[in-house]
Amino acid sequence: MADTTSPVSEIPEDSAWGYLASVEVGRIAVSAGDLPEIFPVNFCLDGESIVFRSAPGTKLEKLAINEHVVFEADGWNEEGGWSVVVKGLGALITDEEELARVKRAPLLPWIPTVKRNWVRITPNRITGRAFFFGPEPAQD
């Protein structure tokens, strides 16, 4: 976490993967046309990529039109928090060998729905910030 003299600090890309691995829920932003949309997803890491499952619907429809996505995950405790943003390409996993491998990941649906679609986010850019919590400084 950042110190009190600098309440916001950058998380190096190589450390950002560790932060992502520490949580199970993030948000994916997709866009097609004029309106971007954001959805919570539970996810896991597969090497240096993010994998989640999805039922048919808006996420997959938007990905079919525009593969550019933004993924964000964050965490916090009493002392501070962090946020990691991944910009990249989202695509359905269709290769049978790859599907067989990712299906062994501990990634189960939250709700009792069938989610046969596996999606991989391949990053182009990863940024992260850590935050030190504290009282608001006095305003002069």
Image: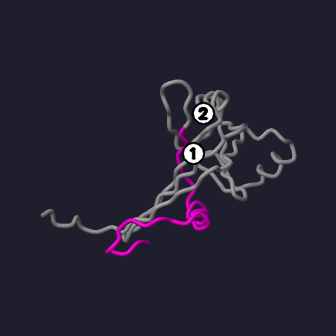
Q: Quadrant of residue 31?
A: top right
Number of numbered labels in the structure image: 2
Q: Amino acid at mark 1?
A: Val
Label 2 vs 1, first from the N-terminus: 1
Q: Which residue is mark 1?
A: 41
Give coordinates of residue 83: x percent, y percent: 47, 58
Q: Which residue is mark 2?
A: 59
Is residue 57 placed above or below 139 in the rendered structure?
Answer: above
Label 1 packing within 10 angstroms: few (<14), some (14-19), many (20+) = some
Give coordinates of residue 118: x percent, y percent: 72, 42
Q: Is residue 130 left or right of residue 32?
A: left
Quarter occupied by the C terminus: bottom left
Quarter occupied by the N terminus: bottom left
State yes or no: discs 2 and 1 in contact (Cβ < 8 Å): yes
Q: Residue at horizontal 39%, vertical 67%?
A: 80
Magenta residues span 1-29
Q: Amino acid at mark 2?
A: Lys
- Name the secondary structure under disc 1: strand
